[in-house]
Amino acid sequence: MKFLNFGKDEKKRSPHSKSTIKSMVREMFLQIRTQWGILMLAAACVIGISILEFMIPQLTKKIIDYMIPGKKYRELLEMAGLIIIAALLLGIFNFVNSYVMTIVSQKAIFQLRDKLYRHTVNLDLKFFDRNRTGDLMARLTGDVNQLQDLVSSDTLSIIANIFTCLVITSYLFYVDWQLALCIIITLPLLFGSSRFFSIRIKSAYRTVRQATAELNNQLQDTLTSIRTIKTFASEDDEADKFSKSSEQNRMATVSASRLSSLFSPLIDWLNYIGMTIVLLVGAWQVMLGHLTVGEIVAYLAYLRLLQGPIRSLSRMVNKVQQSAAAFERIQEVLDTIPEVRDIEKAIILPPVRGEIVFEDVNFAYEKGQPVLQNFHLRLVPNQVTALVGSSGSGKSTIAHLIARMYDVQMGCIYMDGHPLKMVQMKSLRQQMGVVSQEVILLNGTIRDNIAYGNPQATNEEIEAAAAAANAHDFISGFQQGYDTPVGERGIKLSGGQRQRISIARAFLKKPRLIILDEATASLDTESEQQIQHALAVLLPGRTCLVIAHRLSTIQAADQIIVLEKGEIVEKGTHEALLRQEGRYKLLHDRQFSRKEFQIN
């Protein structure tokens, strides 16, 4: 079974279990440090619970040793009333403690998820190239939710229970040191068992988290590709794949559950051994007259109070190890430093003219597989530069580098004389408009999608942008107009409609630099003509980079660059390149002869 592990081996993690737990506790402490007031209220409730739990066995002892032999009927009723009041207070304290800690834990989880999400969306494209969406979703949801158990009423109670255990143990030694020794005999076995199981439980639950992430990956791939799956009638094949992933998840969960299910009964068995020893020795002491029946009953009650925290601790071992496995996956993302990021003293890019210069640029997505080598290129301000060439020649790579989605390994790219690495990425991208072949619309209304790059835009500005993109007429034809839902990824709209909304979005942003990446490659002739007309309105006065497969769309470009294997082999205007009778003319003749053949 293969899982995403960010390139780290599970065996290398195991020795760092303690440091993981320390890091996890420190992280959760940072999330709750601003809630001290409400935490103090919860702590007061826990202290109240501890005091009441200590008092109730004393009241029971008094009833058995004093009131029953003395037939104190009236005092017996008073004592019963005290026990009822103590039980009522216990219920109130438990409710307040549980409710308050729920508030604290949910606030901590909200802050951690928000921190993780903000960090994730600010990572560079290389991170998303390497990691699958389903796994990242699992980290943001299930893994974060798992940490909720660390900030709960049980956790706070354990802190109080440790104090209670010390008080009760001291009391038990005071009453009868022999019985107290009988109890602590089992403690080394309890702690040894906890340590033995905790290491294995953490490893098992990490496998569960990874199996769950793999299941999410399978779901995400299937649901986002449902049209393709149905087109190829592959429903049964995908169902079989999902069944395999689901079976792996089931096996991992059962394996982890086997460990945790064995651990809890083992702890209970050791507790019962301690209770049996105390009962036998205590009964012997009563027979000898060294202890009263009330004292042994109180002693057994305290023993149960002592065993309660031990049981809670055993349950917390499971929770902590599950949470540690989830936290490791969260921390892997939080520890990821984007390769493409702003330097410490990055400047805000002033309004651009649009002169872009590639100077001796080397770039590769993977080491040893160069895409651009010793590459030089200049985009002239307020002109249209077109890139053409075979698939894999580096056209889209150039667009990605201009938007600084990736950083070059050698050389430099300048925007109006400013090295891209010296400017803030946000100030660069805010002045760019990108229209790509694959338009992804967000699940919302048409209005929301047009206004995505400029949320403060008025309705008039949105409609004007749509009109400029030749989109207003078809939008107005919908019953809900601009408030029409587009569906997931814009599925309710045609390709041409999505493309024009994308252009309207670029219009509304009023960018100084436009990148058109195969913007009309998959459209029909009528849609392409409408979009070309919209672009003719958008482009004047702006620097534009057009990546094109259809040469008919770039004939009016000021400069055409022909690329092959990451190198410029020709450049010039459409007419000049045709006269050269080189690579461009070959591409041109192939396309247009094919069109003539289709027409005939």
Image (cartoon, rainbow, N blue to C red):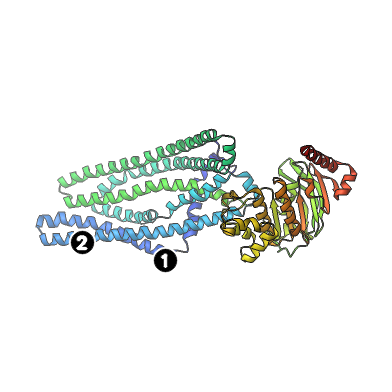
Q: Position of residue 340 (x, y in %)?
A: 67, 53
Q: Distance between the residues labelled 1 and 2?
A: 31 Å
The residue sitting at 14% across, 57% down in the picture is 66
For badge 1, the amino acid type reads Gly
Foreground residue, 297 or 586?
A: 586
For badge 2, the amino acid type reads Leu
Instruction: Evaluate whether residue 600 shows in this view.
Output: yes
Tally of numbered tags = 2
> Which disc is residue 431 wearing?
none
The residue sitting at 35% across, 49% down in the picture is 312
Instruction: Evaluate whether residue 519 shows in this view.
Output: no
Foreground residue, 439 or 355?
A: 439
Foreground residue, 558 or 523?
A: 523
> Which disc is residue 37 wearing?
1
Q: Is 487 left or right of 588, judged from the image as shown?
A: left
The residue sitting at 72% across, 53% down in the picture is 530
Image: 426 above or below 131: below
Q: In which quarter of the image is residue 369?
A: top right
Q: Do the residues labelled 1 and 2 touch (CB within 8 Å)?
A: no
Q: Position of residue 587 (x, y in %)?
A: 81, 41
Image: 106 above or below 438: below
Q: Earlier in the sequence, mark 1 or mark 2?
A: 1
**Which residue is denoted by mark 2 in the rendering?**
82
Q: What element carries label 2?
A: helix
Q: Where is residue 529 in the image (x, y as percent from the top left)?
A: 74, 51
